Amino acid sequence: MAMDDLLEGTSLTGRQAAIIFFTFLALIILAGLLLITFSDFFRNLVMFVEPAGARVGSSTLVAGAGL
């Protein structure tokens, strides 16, 4: 069966359609589980982090700040 015939879907049997559907569903569930598992990692990728010493009243010293 050619790829364009498969994607058109007119000649699929019920078993083939079920396999494609449940494979796609499993892929979505797997992606969701990976996102939940690594949610701290992904949150740290997009979280805004203040540069050291940028806060007013901060007691941290920045190397070279007096230069």
Image: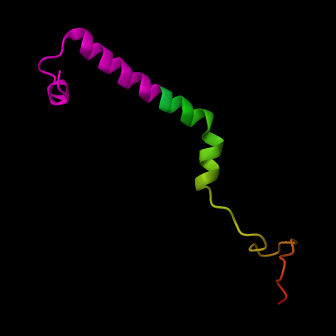
Observer-nearest of 42 and 59? 42
Instruction: Locate residue 47 relative to residue 30 in the image: left or right.
Output: right
- Image point (77%, 70%), residue name: 52
- Image point (62%, 33%), residue name: 37
Specify the principal SS of the magenta part: helix
Q: Please tell me in which quadrant of the rendered image residue 12 appears.
A: top left
- Image point (38%, 23%), residue name: 25
Q: Give the range drawn in magenta.
A: 1-29
- Image point (70%, 66%), residue name: 50
Where residue 42 appears, as percent x and y from the top left, is 59, 46
Work out whether 12 lies above or below 53. above
Is 45 magenta? The answer is no
Q: Quadrant of the N terminus?
A: top left
Where residue 63 appears, as percent x and y from the top left, is 84, 78
Work out whether 39 lies above or below 17. below
Instruction: Locate residue 57 relative to residue 41 in the image: left or right.
Output: right
Q: Please tell me in which quadrant of the rendered image residue 27 appears.
A: top left
Q: Quadrant of the C terminus?
A: bottom right
Where residue 40 appears, as percent x and y from the top left, is 65, 43
Instruction: Locate residue 26 relative to residue 3 in the image: left or right.
Output: right
